[in-house]
Image (spheres, grey):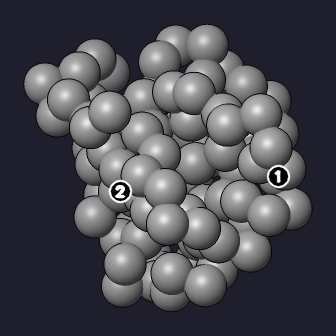
Amino acid sequence: MSANPVRGEAEVRIAGEILVLRPSFAALVAAEGEIGPLFALVERAAEGRLGLAEMVALFWHCLRERPERLTREAFAEGVTARGLAANTPALKALLGQILAGR
């Protein structure tokens, strides 16, 4: 299943599987509960100070569907293995949705 950019969705490929990230209200509230205010997260990202753990947390909470066998640890390893350049488009899409408030 592919991401729908109109809904603010983005994709990441983890362990050969395409996973869709959807920044729903519930997902963003959960992410904010773990990593703090989202506006501060956007500011840190703009300043180049966004930590890997913060990105993983945001992605994890925004997963539209979590494969049953996928643990958070395995997901974090997959995000890390992809590298910053490969994760940037998905991160940019999510941060844009946070700022747009859709």
Residue 74 is at least partly visible in this image? yes
Q: Secondary structure at mark 2?
A: helix
C-alpha separation, residue under disc 1 versus residue under disc 2? 18 Å
Label 2 neighbour load within 10 Å: few <14, some 14-19, many 20+: some
Name the residue rendered at 57%, 27% in the picture: 65
Image quadrant in which the N terminus is located: top left
**Residue 49 badge:** none
Q: Amino acid at mark 2?
A: Ala
* Residue identified by numbered label 2: 90
Residue 28 is at least partly visible in this image? no
Percent position (x, y) of residue 46? 39, 68
Name the residue rendered at 64%, 80% in the picture: 80
Q: Earlier in the sequence, mark 1 or mark 2?
A: 1
In front here: 87 or 42? 87
Label 1 neighbour load within 10 Å: few <14, some 14-19, many 20+: few
In front here: 58 or 68? 68
Q: Would residue 41 be found to the left or right of residue 68 on screen?
A: left
Q: Amino acid at mark 1?
A: Arg
Percent position (x, y) of residue 37? 66, 37
Percent position (x, y) of residue 64? 51, 27
> Which residue appears farthest toward the left when viewing the image?
6
Name the residue rendered at 23%, 21% in the picture: 7
Percent position (x, y) of residue 101? 32, 21
Q: Secondary structure at mark 1?
A: helix
* Residue identified by numbered label 1: 72
Q: Would residue 6 be found to the left or right of residue 94 on screen?
A: left
